[in-house]
Image: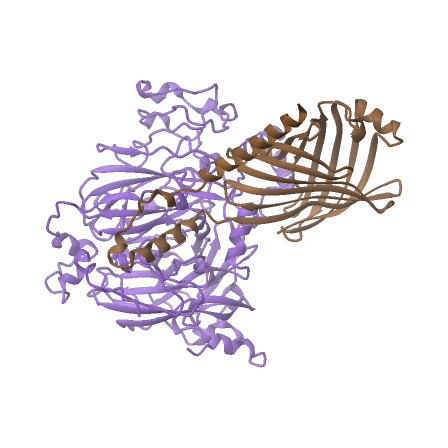
Chain colours: A brown, B purple
Amino acid sequence: MHRTLFSAFAALAIATGASAQTHDQHGDASGDKPWSQADAYFDPAEMDAARAHAQGHSGDTPFAMVRFDRLEAQSSDGETVGVWDADAWYGGDINKVWLKTEGEYSFEENDLEEAEVQLLWSRAISRYFDLQTGVRYDFEPDGLAHAVLGVQGLAPYWFEVDGAAFLSEEGDLTASFEAEYELLLTNRLILQPRLAAGFSAQDIPERELGSGLTNLQAGLRLRYEFVREFAPYIGVEHSASFGRTADLIEAAGGEADETRFVIGIRTWY
Amino acid sequence: MFNRRHFLQGSALMGLSSLLPASLLPAWARSASDGNTGLAPTTATEFNLSVGRFPVRIDGRAGEAVGVNGTLPAPLIRFREGDEITLNVTNTLDEDTSIHWHGLLVPFQMDGVPGVTFPGIRPGETFTYKYAVPQSGTYWYHSHSGLQEQEGVYGPLIIDPHHHDPVSYDREYVLVLSDWSFESPYRIFAKLKKMSDAYNFQQRTMGDFLKDAQERGLGTAWDERAMWGQMRMSPRDIADVTGATYHYLINGHATADNWNGVFQPGERVRLRIINASAMTIFNVRLPGLPMTIVAADGLNVQPLEVDEFQMGVAETYDVIIEPKDDRAYAFVAESIDRSGQAVATFGPRPGMRAEAPALRAVPTLTMKDMGMDHGSMDHGAMGHGNMDMSGKEMGDMDHSMMDHSKMDHAAMGHDMSEMDMTGHEGHDMGGMEMDHSAHGMTEDASWPVEKKDIKRGPGVANVAMMPMSRLDEPGIGLENVGHRVMRYSQLRSLDRNPDLRPPGREMEIHLTSNMERYMWSFDGVKFSEVTEPIIFHEGERLRVTLINNTMMPHPIHLHGMFFDLVNGGGDHKPRKHTVIVKPGEKLSFDVSADHVGDWAFHCHLLYHMHAGMMQVVSVLPSTDKKPMDHEHMDHEMMDHDMPMEHEMPMDHDMMDHSAMGHDKHGEMK
């Protein structure tokens, strides 16, 4: 049953993606030329090509962006882990393909502890929000695939938000929510509060997750933008686990609450 | 062609002054210290222009430009009104190019817009432009291909009147204002698409907030920040590309290069000022020296003495200065967002350097710039007959944020009979539009008005609730500068307008955007999505009303025809090819569709156009082809003070654009 649900979810994601993609191809198939008076003076075929080029280059150029929102070392009690939170996209104003990846590497154990990659199709659905859907694969701690449905965008008062629901191939439903804000101390010195929350619809003991609100991360990062594309930062992040999740972590010998100091860079191209 | 700039590159041993670009520029662009004591009135009828890539030295640093005949700016093209001109444009680039003659009434297939009026000029090819134009004045030319305009393909163009010039002067200079970046324009555009405020280092900060809170009270400061934040808009969103990457230039000279011109005290000096920037609206002034505006966009206006004016990209202004004192005067072109400026010098002796004034405080937008100024409007004077609140997408605008206490609803005389409140919830009235045709300088419309629905979606962040006439305002940041600043409402054509028919119809065009996504469009439709042009019918007189729903001023340019700006000027309205539409503004121009063809219509901020803020106006030939009105055509651009049509040694056929169009002028070599 879980499997069926997963497939249906994924199929829906792909179908909506495909249909919207065809919608995005405008104009050229209609046959009628929007204007053609110059055809009387120049080769109509050349004019057609020039018209298509001119129109395509005024509003329909695709772009690509790669960004490390957080590339940092986190340390607490002498233990240091490396954390990345990066994304990349390619596409036009309305439709984009997104790649998102997050993970954690333990320098103590020389081991990748968490690593996930999401491949999403993203469609602008309103002025400030994109609907994103696709798949997520967790390489660590276990190889597990999820279907993803999320919304990313800019909320009123300039909060950058990203919320998504994940349905694993095991049939487990989880969700995450992230919000960031930028407080301009100066135009280059920027304080960034960040809040991330995890939810689970059920207990998933093998991932140390209990149902309900599983964990919260509250971070504060101070960066300096030497140029817009490159900014080193320092900060602090507190993470807390709740309810069954906290019990499961503590039972496994972990800490439910933790404060870490962070140092890292934010960069994009 | 011998590349003088290239020669300069390796010349480290040369003296400092010869390292400045000035000495290697065409005569008109040089400083007085390099021998330029004013323009020579040399005209020609044939010009050879070669578009290519070459090294340049800008503001003391080496870069690479795309330009004409190896100079930046491009050579001055000067010819006489009515002469048949031949311009051979050779493309030495490895990409297509084009040259558009900005403001010239050429036959449309000579207008130089790839994909609209011709296919463009392929690498290695020469395209020959031939035309005769019935106009004189200060114009310019630039590439209409890709982003070449930012890379350096722009130059001045002067047409000398065939007979008498009503403007007298002892000396003249041309001043080409531009913005240069060492970043590739394609990179600039990509950065804007990824982070639309990438070049804005003038956002309001915590420090500004604290200062504001101290001066106006914490509550007021907080509410004001909250209001902007709630709408996800920035009151410092004034220029997309700024001094963070731009070097502002006057005739290719940065401030450090000190372009200088000479005068003898007491002379009348004519400055032909051209804003050839890609993205920069300039505030132009000479501290301590008034300017008399004598021409706008090439055409003569009644002399208007001012101390400063705001100049949209692609506008040209001719001013007369009469320096009386034996001292140096600064000529200042300041970017509208005050992130930088270019300063030149006029002095009695070559090589003088005037003191550059400090940049003035960064302007901050107000709710008026969003078309929402409830406080200061005289509602009693407005005709609210056509309020349309029909189920438009809610614009996230909360009226509770606005100061209703200042609105006198009782005095507003609303005609509620036409109000459609469908889908109107609570206080959210984002899509509300009001017809302000009775407000300000526009007359009551007694002709049909075509209002198109804006295509709402991710590309339209805001719809101005109360767009209003702002022609009587000097422009962003110049409201309280303590001296006389030109307002569009003051401009009067020197000649009587050639076509005094009332418009037969009116069409509204909305300027739309989503700054956050860096999407720009007309009526919510990007140029890439356009399936039908704006239709004008040959011979008709119509009114075009532009409504700016964005937070930025847009210099809107219509190719191929001058339009009469409806500014209260009666039969002496200023005739322009480009007009700045301020944020939240609604303005109108009347235009006679005389010149059949497909004409580009776009925002002249290059990256706005490149993002989609462009359309095509198709002037379709009238089907019942009435004989061309020669009387009307000939008079259109000429000096009406002088009944000259019979003494002019000009071929009437040459003036008749529809006839001209059928000659095979556009041959490829």
Using residue B536 as the reference point, say whether residue B214 is left or right of it: right
- Asked where in the image residue B141 lies, by quadrant, the reply is bottom left
Looking at the picture, how far across and down is residue A113, in whole percent?
80, 41
Question: Which one is nearer the viewer's eye here, A98 or A72?
Answer: A98
Q: Is residue B557 visible?
A: no
Question: Which one is nearer the viewer's eye here, A201 or B541?
Answer: A201
Quadrant of the snapshot with the N terminus of chain B: bottom left
Using residue A123 as the reference point, say whether residue B313 is left or right of it: left
Looking at the picture, how far across and down is residue B214, in whole percent?
63, 35
Using residue B422 as the reference point, say whether residue B41 is left or right of it: left
Judge whether A93 appears above or below A257 on screen: below
> Going by the picture, which residue comes out furthest to the bottom?
B13
- Asked where in the image residue A253 lies, by quadrant, the reply is top right
Looking at the picture, how far across and down is residue B351, in whole percent?
48, 72
Looking at the picture, how far across and down is residue B431, in whole percent?
42, 28
Judge whether A65 appears above or below B510 on screen: below
Q: Is residue A205 visible?
A: yes
Judge whether A240 appears above or below A182 on screen: above
The residue shown at (25%, 61%) is B136
Question: Which one is nearer the viewer's eye here, B172 or A52?
Answer: A52
Judge whether A121 appears above or below B465 on screen: below
Quadrant of the snapshot with the C terminus of chain B: bottom left
The residue shown at (31%, 18%) is B417
How many numbered circles does the render carry? 0
